[in-house]
Amino acid sequence: MSIVRRALAFVAALALYALVMPILAFAATPTTIEVGNGSEFDNAVATVNAATSGEYIIELTDDIQTGGASFSSSQPVSIVGNGHTIALGKGHIYVNPSAQLSLGAADGSDTLKISGGNEQSNDEPGLLQIQGTCNMYPGVTIADRKGNNYFGGGVTVQGGTFHMYGGTIDNCGITGGSMCYGGGVGVAYGGSFTMDGGEIKNCFATSPFKWADAGMNPLWIASAGGGVFVSGGSSFVMTGGTISNNKANEMGGGVAVVASPNEIEGGRWGKLQSSAQILDGTISGNEANGGAGVLSSAYFFNPYGLCAATPNVGAAEKPGLFLKNTTITNNKANQDEGYGAGVLAMKMKSPAAAEIRDCTIKKNSAAVGGGVASYGNFTSLTIDGCTITGNEATNYGGGFAAESNSGEGAGTTITNTKLCNNIADKAASDIYLNGSVAKLSAAKDMDELYLGKPDDVTNKKIDGWYLDNEDSRYATQAKEQRNEYANYASIGSDGKVYLVAAAKPSLVKITFANEDGTTIYSEDWYEIGTKADQITVPTPTKPSDDKYDYVFDSWHTTIEDVTGDAVYKAQFKKVFKNFSAKYAFNSTSSDKQLPSEVLAVLPKDTNNYVYNDAVNAITPSQTTVDVANGTWIFMGYDRDSAIADMTTADSEGNVTFTGSWKFVEKSDTPSAPDNSDQSGANGGDKSQVNSNDKSGTAQEANSPSPNTADGTSVGFCCTFLIAAIVALGSAVRANNRIRRRRNY
């Protein structure tokens, strides 16, 4: 190809790039509609609904009030708040089946509040009604909605998809009616809710109505899921965030997954279609009659048709409850009759099941099963790798309780779990089984202390579950007579079993203490024979006083292998809070006293030094001083530098440098040494700058960055066009020169 042809091809490519790129850039830019009042917001929604292409952003410039909105277009639309509020009153924002709505900014840079003003809304969905797709991002708040006789106080998901990436749902709920489900979020009709972060808090599903009092099915529940409600073949997935301080009068204060009528009736008891997969996060401070933290049930159910479109076919691929890496704490069930303050699983037939893995369940309280409870036939419950401690029951099963759970496929399996240090007022501090089967792994590796009756705390390592009966617990059952339950690996359903985690004495106490003997580290228990390097040793501290800091020096005796109880006392050394540098001169000529002219060049260091700082000596401003009969010559300091500590300082914290001067008579005065290039202790630095001077501060200048903008693309392309034309001209001229040479 000739030079000209190649140049023309290059120019054509540049021209095409210049023409196409601006078009592409403009085509990818969303259309932004600014709104500052309710009327403008309504017009913006109408514009979006009429669109057949493109992406839209509705951007608030002020707080607005509106009766609600309905998004129906399939074109993506976002609402950006810029710190403003959409006040809906009794209205709601409806996301139709084909619509795609996002709230806030994906990067969390925007703040938006959607408020209902806490007005009563009867038989109406929440502030958001989702049948299509809705994304909620960090910085968004949905708050203050009080509904009556519906599901989903804050957000109602009816077969749609709701993805909560962050943000807050606060003070929303359903109250007063016979249908009060999902104070924060209600999910039904095969819908899905994913929570990847954020908070659902202070929400409620409360009602004084009782179906049993009305002569209806006593298993019908009127209020469930204070934070989240899932039913009708729907799914809830939580991978982070917090569900806290929510309330349901009946079941599931934090999360409730319950069956619909068509899952229960017609001989289908236990066929739960919905699912909750809680894979990370915290569920705390929630309240309900039962299942205060989390409830999964095909026993108690809602009486309404909140069902999947096709019976037994729902959105949940794995029905039931799956908990992993979750903290469940401080939830409270009814103290007279409530079951499962932390988690309650009820009557779920295969393939529905309950699994709790690698979770921490602590400080929850109920009448039965303070930590976890299982109730009713069918349910298969697995607990593995968990810590279940510090839970309480006013009756039985401080840690775990199972009642009436036997038959094919039913039962509880507990493995690799620290289930201990729980309390039950009547019996079974840790495990209560009533007509239920269970498989319990040995508890030899729980490494916890036995906590039964307050006066029965001893140095013991748990090695199994022991009988803890109502009529023979603690005081009447001597420690040496406490036998491990005969067949703890597999317990049948006959009768009642009351167990507590306990052990034979096998541990000794190691205490780390202050100089005065007070404990500085919580007591710990170690097996006899534990090696010294396996003992957890704290780093002790001692408060400073007005003059001294205290630095840990050592333990009063060497830490040794464990053979019995031991106390290790900390020893500290004191150091001055502040050190100073001090200078002195002396004469090397025994018959000569230093004159005032020499003493006048004593360095002065105003810096404060702390322990272990390096202190460098300051060279005198003059290293030779002439007097009437001769010259005094500086010979150097006793040391060039020192570390600020108690060995180098005097009783007042002064690090002293002593300089020596030699006198030379005038008749034989030698030439003074050239110290112009010296530095440090014996140098001639007449600026008297201390290399350790802490008064200077390095400064960095911030260079401004070039300003760029998306609107430069057209100018950029034009520049390229001009360059290409110039290149073409050069190529043509070069080609003509070649032809002339050939012709010549």
Image (cartoon, rainbow, N blue to C red):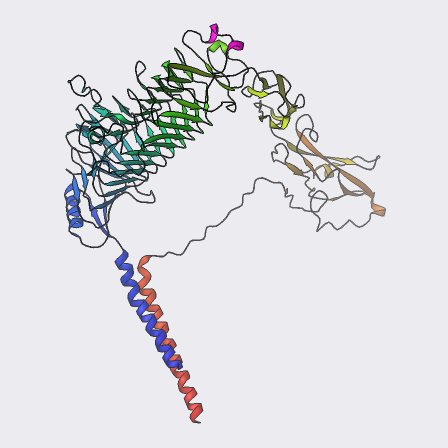
Q: Count every numbered label the image shows and give the total.
A: 0
Picture layout, residue 368 above or below residue 323: above
> Between 734 and 434, which is closer to the camera in this rendering?
434
| 478 part of magenta stretch | yes
Span of residues in magenta:
469-490
Name the dominant secondary structure of the magenta segment.
loop
* Residue 151 in the image, given as x and y percentages of width and height: 20, 31
> Between 6 and 387, which is closer to the camera in this rendering?
387
Measuring 52% from the left and 20% from the top, which residue is drawn there?
A: 463
* Residue 546 in the image, given as x and y percentages of width and height: 58, 23
Q: Residue furthest top?
A: 476
Task: Give the quarter of the figure containing the C terminus.
Answer: bottom left
Q: Seen in the image, is 97 located left or right of residue 476?
A: left
Picture layout, residue 195 above or below residue 33: above
Task: Give the quarter of the figure containing the N terminus.
Answer: bottom left
Q: Quadrant of residue 262?
A: top left
Measuring 42% from the left and 53% from the top, which residue is drawn there?
A: 704
Picture layout, residue 584 above or below residue 288: below
The answer to whether residue 513 is seen in the rendering is no
